[in-house]
Amino acid sequence: MRYKVTVVGAGNVGATTAQRIAEAELADVVMVDVAADLATGKALDMMEAAPILGFNAKISGGGDYGATEGSDITVVTAGLPRKKDMSRDDLLAINQEIVGEVVRQVVQRSPGTILILVTNPLDAMCEVARRVSGFPRERVFGMAGVLDAARMRYFIASELNVSVEDVDAFVLGGHGDTMVPLPRYATVNGIPLPQLLSADRIEAINERTRKGGAEIVNYYKQGSAYYAPSAAVYDMVAAILHDKKKILPCAVLLQGEYGLNDLFVGVPARLGAGGMEQVIELELTAEEQAELHKSAEAVRELVEALPK
């Protein structure tokens, strides 16, 4: 069985996501962008690498949503990119309009698709996609925590001079400056992080994790991160298409979990063939719970600012 994944947006994140999915032969990929020629050209460029790299998945690109019909997963990266000195919140109004139209076009042609949102401000855009699609929470969620946790894992591995493969970590909350790294749940080959690093070094890693996106933006001057975000999306897509039942931190619509309701917040979730199959509830300290609720309130403010 050949799967089909649509990636909306042929910018750096979208194109690199399409490339990773096709090269791993997870699925055939359709890239759609308002800049149709850009999407067509990037798809052709990738396919011309296929004989060298030896992958047989097909990548097509253009501006016509007709080619997306029957997509198993749709990854939405379209939107105004974050620029230097711009907060994710600044993107709200423009990207709401873009994401809303994208979701309308996609759902009309693929009513059974699973939507993975990447566009910022991520948590609010998940709510936009939910409202427009009418999908249950199992089929609308966002890529945030996988990226944030990967950054934290890299920073821990670098600090300790150990393999990144040995490091596990979780980051909860909204995808922004109020995210909640959980060093208490971070481990290095099973060893709890607090046994390996001092409290001040852990807090430095937490702070760098919170500002990980801005750090890349400051280096790039123009544009934002895309290598790590595309890898995070790839991880989620692979978990779904291969029915891995993999636990990954995602922006999920909570329905009472963690004491929160009707809000997309980053939490650990099990991803499989059904999409988001289960929210995993961690036992949090009073301080961690307070930080999570503070982060959730920042998300709620954004959602309440969305026109009905």
Image (spheres, grey):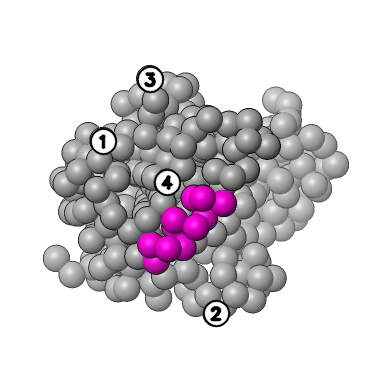
The residue that label 3 is drawn on is 1
In depth, the one of 85 and 4 nearer the eye is 4
The residue that label 2 is drawn on is 85
3 relative position to 26: left or right: left
**Quadrant showing the C terminus:** bottom left
**On residue 70, which mark appears?**
1
- The Cα–Cα distance between marks 4 and 1, rounded to whole angstroms, is 15 Å
217 relative position to 68: left or right: right
Q: Residues within 10 Å of mark 1 (few under 14, many from 20)?
A: some
Q: Residues within 10 Å of mark 3 (few under 14, many from 20)?
A: few
N-terminal label among 4 and 1? 4
Is 43 situated above or below 213?
above
**On residue 60, which mark appears?**
4
- The Cα–Cα distance between marks 4 and 2, rounded to whole angstroms, is 35 Å
N-terminal label among 1 and 3? 3
Circle 4/circle 2 CB separation < 8 Å: no
